[in-house]
Amino acid sequence: MKELMDRLTRSVGTITAPDARAQAEAAAYLDKLTKPPGSLGKLESLAIQLAGITGTIKPSFKKKAVVVMAGDHGVCEEGVSAFPSEVTPQMVMNFLNGGAAVNVLARQAGADVLCVDIGVAADLSHERLLSRKINKGTKNIAKGPAMTRAEAEQAIMTGAEVAAELYSHGTRLFVTGEMGIGNTTPSAAVFAVLSGKPPAEVVGRGTGVSDERLMHKIRVVEQAITVNRPMAEDPVDVLAKVGGYEIGGLAGLILGAAAKGCPVVIDGFISSAAALIAAAICPESRSYMIASHHSKERGHALLLQALELSPMLHMDMRLGEGTGGVLCLHMIEAACRIMSEMATFESAGISGGEI
């Protein structure tokens, strides 16, 4: 894994600790604003986190991007999804044409949507598609490894390079998104291995499978872990054996954004599994992550606990795509505006301030 970290460092830079001075200044400034200390709850902790990431107590994010990584999964052969694999390329075109839920919500939030083909099992062509295909879908993890280790490293590097490319064009705030029929299965497998939790606790319904198919899905994840024997102490090995190309791509995107000193909003279950890989590769990257929401997918609460992240929203969502992450952009904007626009007790001429 050292070789991968060296490549990442050369490509996108080093991930450093947040600016403690800026965090302290933000906390002190928040207590000067015309409100009781701590009364804005998570908005205040978010403002302090953003200060630490950016090095300024009044950050502004003019250019925001949702990066939707798309890939297919051989494990769909096992009947783990309510939808066929053909939906993946169809949805990719929907993203590119602006018709998906994430497009609608991103337009409202003033964010760009970029779709990356990192492993779709179809030949796709579109002027707005970022084509970074590693292979046409992963192998069936119930029968063998999802990909080679080299492919896993390539997926991570691809995500990091996409982050660096977007940064060079002005993006300063990233949101993780994904598309891949069947991808809750490898995500659950990744989480189960890295956390040591039994699949029965972390495997959920994904696209809405029946009770019978849910039990089958749990058995498939158990089989994948038994067959492949991924090493929990090596996150790249886990990704290669039971993961997915888009999961690796998102892990790389998170690392790449952190290396550029940018916050990255984590969407739902699949994105959080990718975040767990990123955190296992570089623990400091966790400081740059913002958990957008608590998905209804079983296991997501446990995954967020493993990441030591507290979600901003509880909306009973489980769509993915980056939809929960985009909604969180409004909370980030609110935190930034509190710091830049709210009056202090002194400027407003209000007595008190020590409550």
Image: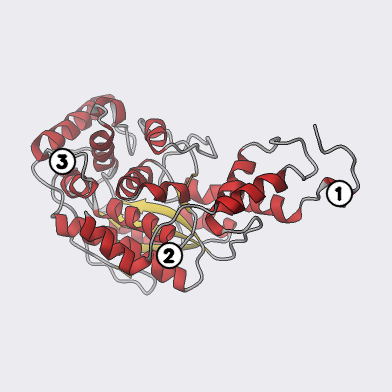
The spot of residue 351 in percent (x, y) is 90, 40
Above or below — where is 189 with respect to 199? below
The spot of residue 73 in percent (x, y) is 21, 49
- Residue type at numbered disc 3: Pro
Mark 3 sits on what residue?
230
* Label 1 residue SS: helix
* Label 2 residue SS: loop
Residue in the image at 78% along x and 39% along y: 35
- Residue type at numbered disc 1: Glu
The spot of residue 60 in percent (x, y) is 62, 61
Q: Nearer the viewer, mark 2 or mark 3?
A: 3
Mark 1 sits on what residue?
346
- Residue type at numbered disc 2: Asn
- As measured in the structure, the alpha-carbon distance from the residue carrying label 2 to the one carrying label 3 is 38 Å
The answer to whether residue 331 is left or right of residue 67 is: right
- As measured in the structure, the alpha-carbon distance from the residue carrying label 3 to the one carrying label 1 is 59 Å
Mark 2 sits on what residue?
97
